[in-house]
Image: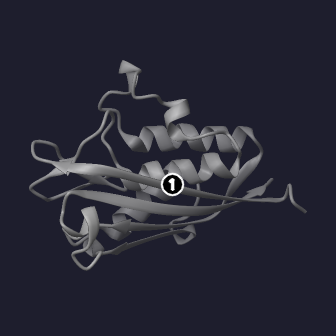
Amino acid sequence: MADNFRIGHGYDVHRLVEGRPLILGGVQIPYCKGLEGHSDADVLLHAISDAVLGALALGDIGAHFPDTDERYRGISSLLLLGRVADLMRASGYRVGNVDATVLAQKPKLAPCIPEMRGKIAAALGCEPEQVSVKATTEEGLGFTGCGDGIAAHAVCLLYSV
């Protein structure tokens, strides 16, 4: 039974800076700041990637796509999630579901969530109904609440095929 299902958790955070586009869930969000990072810094996709890798006991996104490797500078995190999905399939697993939460005071993300779900599902090879994305503020508290950064948590359930 233990080999039939795997659960993983992922977390990521990046600082908001001027001069970069804001990419979340593979979607460019209209906003005056973007996330700082080696890749496109998509915290949502990084958290989901880490959840899948964690479920498979394959380390984390930094081990597979290190920020010291110039091949990954500016790369789309959708491409990285697709590579994580390839590892998942090669390990004999598929997505049961993904549940993710973005923590950001601004901007409001609700209008973009359906597109995010579709892009995430396509990268993972599952249906949008298997992907939940939620957004919440931190009521002005902490680094996300004061607008210094954005964080994301994700959990996933994988099943063996």
**Residue sitting at the far bottom:** 139
Above or below: residue 89 compared with residue 28? above
How many numbered badges does the structure rendering display? 1
Residue at the top extreme of this rendering? 70
Please state if 121 lies on the left or on the right of 6 as rendered: left
Spot occupied by residue 25 in the image (x, y as percentages of width and height): 37, 56
Residue matched to label 1 = 48
66 or 110, which lies in front?
66
Q: Percent from the top left, x then y, of residue 155?
A: 57, 63
The residue depicted at 24 percent of the width and 42 percent of the height is 36
Q: Quadrant of residue 130?
A: bottom right
The image shows residue 90, relative to residue 144, as above or below, that is above
Element class at badge 1: helix
Residue 21 vertical position relative to residue 2 in the rendered view, above or below: above
Seen as rendered, the residue at the extreme right is 1
Q: In x, y percent, where is residue 82?
A: 52, 42
Residue 98 x, y percent position in the rendering: 56, 64
Could one spot residue 26 in this view of the protein?
A: no
Viewer can see residue 78? yes
For image coordinates 22% across by 71% down, the residue present is 105
Going by the image, does 23 lie left or right of 158? Answer: left
- Image quarter hosting the N terminus: bottom right
Q: Where on the picture, by quarter, is residue 158?
A: bottom right
Residue at 39% across, 28% down:
67
